[in-house]
Every structure is written in C-alpha cells, then in structure tokens.
Image (cartoon, rainbow, N blue to C red):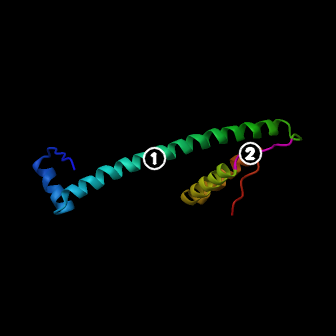
Amino acid sequence: MPIITFKVTEQQKMDLDAVCGANQSQYIRDAVFRQVEQSERLDRIEYRLFDLERTVGRLADRLDRAHAKPDAPVKADVSPEVMGMLAEVVLQLRGIIQPGKTTSAIASVKQGGWPPLSIR
C-alpha cells in the first residue's frame, strides 16, 4: 500500500493525538474518505432536488392553466417516485417548521386558488 505523508503544526499533532490515539492513519483515512462519500451523497441529493424543482415548476404551470380555465381537467403526469418524493419533502418540512408557519403556508396556497395538500 502506498504511503502518503503531510506536514502538520505541533498543535495539530497534539490535537490529532488527543482525538485518535494510536491509530492515526486509520483515523485520517476514515475522515478523508467519509468526506468524499458525503460529498458524493450531497451531489446525488442536489440532482434530486433539481429534478424535484423542475417537476414542481411543471405542476405549478399546470395548476395556473387549470386555474385560468376552471372547467378544464388537469392530468398530472408525475411519476409515483416523484409524488412519493414530493410527499416526503412536504412531511419533513412540516416536521421542522412551527405550526403557525404551516397554517400561514396553507392559507397562502388557498389564497392562490389551489387546494392545500392534506397528508395526515
């Protein structure tokens, strides 16, 4: 296995000794590759969020058109995976925000003329 070395200050060396003990190589290897793995995971999440944003935009356009023509049927062309992801995002957001803000968001949706999402 190749060996990689790098310089640290005395203080950094003491901090490293205090945190990881005897197996510094394994500690550094775990820290470096865990960060790479997390970065790759964040890239995948960013791509899914971008796809979700496009889907929500398309849905908003359809709702705007349906709102302009109330008698026109609206057919959702959203895959079950995307609907599941949307529902998950909504539920997670509802779990972290204050109840008053949820009420305000629902009121804004109603004011826009759309039915609020009711997932219980």
Q: Is residue 118 left or right of residue 101?
A: right
Q: Which residue bears the numbered disc 1?
A: 42
Residue 105 in the image: state x and y as whole percent: 65, 50
- Three-letter amino acid code of the residue under disc 2: Gln
Mark 1 crowd level (few <14, some 14–19, many ≥20, 10 Å Cα): few
> Which residue range is magenta in the image?
73-79
Q: Is residue 53 above or below residue 98?
A: above
Question: Mark 2 or mark 1: which comes first in sequence?
Answer: 1
> In the image, what residue occupies the spot 29% across and 55% down?
30
**Nearer-the-camera pick, 46 or 34:** 34
Q: Is residue 57 above or below residue 29?
A: above
Residue 92 in the image: state x and y as whole percent: 57, 57
**Nearer-the-camera pick, 114 or 55:** 55
Mark 2 crowd level (few <14, some 14–19, many ≥20, 10 Å Cα): few
Residue 117 in the image: state x and y as whole percent: 71, 54
Q: Which residue bears the numbered disc 2?
A: 111
Name the disc covering residue 66, or none. Answer: none
**In what element is the residue under mark 1?**
helix
- Magenta span includes 77: yes
Q: Residue 24 appears in which quarter of the rendering?
A: bottom left
| Magenta portion: prevailing SS class | loop
Residue 80 in the image: state x and y as whole percent: 69, 52
- Disc 2 to disc 1: CB gap under 8 Å: no
